[in-house]
Image (cartoon, rainbow, N blue to C red):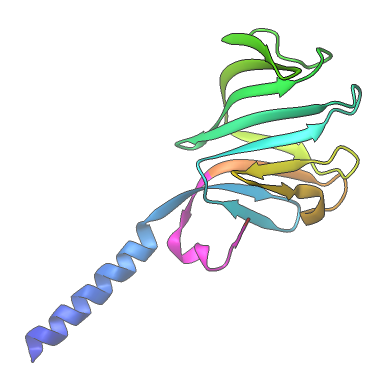
């Protein structure tokens, strides 16, 4: 009987250690008062450029604790457009630039007027519906402890 209690106690302790130390890699999308999590390995960020009034799309992947800007799609060159990519091409009316640039975090402003949106596989998450207009949003690649998963909101 003592062996059975010892085994159950040990299994419980191992489960607690696992829950305490195992971390799930996610993207954290954090505003001024609330955070959301994305458990996908990639996402697209898209918006309507405030000057050119054209759609702009950036594709990001997670690599350890960094965001990798894989590539970007836009329709017209203007201020802030990347001009030194690994490869530049055109397709479907868009200029496509491969970049592979690493960032520790991404700072974005939520805005209904520019339609700040995260694309997760087959669905659009309208960030301006989750955050106040002109609220600063920080996107980071983080490792979330399993015990925090129950407290977080996943998109």
Q: How many numbered marks have been drawn onto this rendered protein structure?
A: 0
Task: Report if residue 145 lies within the magenta region.
Answer: yes
Residue drawn at 37 percent across, 65 percent down: 19
> Residue 127's spot in the image, x, y percent?
76, 48
* Quarter of the image where one finds residue 84: top right
Left or right of residue 155: residue 145: left
Residue at 75%, 37% (x, y): give it: 108
- Name the residue at the bottom extreme: 1
Quadrant assignment for the C terminus = bottom right
The reply to whether the magenta stretch includes residue 149 is yes
Residue situated in front as seen by the camera: 73 or 79: 73
> In the rendered view, does 63 fall on the left or right side of 155?
left
Which residue occupies 36% across, 58% down? 21
Image quadrant occupied by the N terminus? bottom left
Going 62% across and 30% down the picture, which residue do you hit? 59
Q: Residue 7: percent from the left, percent from the top?
A: 14, 79
Q: Is residue 78 above or below residue 130?
A: above
Q: Point out residue 11 in the picture as x, y percentages from the top left corner.
A: 22, 74
User: Depth check: 69 or 5 in front?
Assistant: 69
Taking the image as drawn, is residue 85 in sight? no
Q: Position of residue 131 (x, y in %)?
A: 79, 53
Residue reaching furthest front? 92
Magenta span of residues: 142-154
Instruction: Say if 18 sits above or below 132 in the image.
Output: below
Instruction: Tell me, yes or no, if residue 150 can be seen here.
Output: yes
């Amino acid at each position: 009987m003592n062996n059975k209690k010892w085994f159950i106690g040990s299994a419980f302790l191992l489960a607690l250690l696992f829950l305490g130390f195992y971390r799930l890699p996610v993207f954290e999308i954090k505003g001024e008062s609330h955070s959301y999590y994305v458990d996908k390995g990639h996402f697209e960020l898209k918006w309507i450029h405030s000057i050119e009034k054209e759609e702009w799309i950036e594709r990001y992947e997670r690599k350890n604790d960094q965001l990798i800007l894989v590539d970007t799609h836009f329709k017209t060159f203007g201020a802030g457009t990347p001009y030194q990519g690994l490869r530049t091409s055109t397709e479907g009316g868009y200029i496509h630039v491969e970049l592979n640039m690493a960032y520790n975090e991404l700072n974005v402003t939520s805005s209904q007027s520019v339609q700040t949106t995260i694309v997760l596989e087959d669905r659009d998450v309208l960030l301006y519906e989750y955050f106040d207009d002109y609220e600063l949003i920080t996107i980071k690649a983080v490792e979330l402890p399993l015990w925090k998963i129950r407290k977080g909101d996943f998109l």
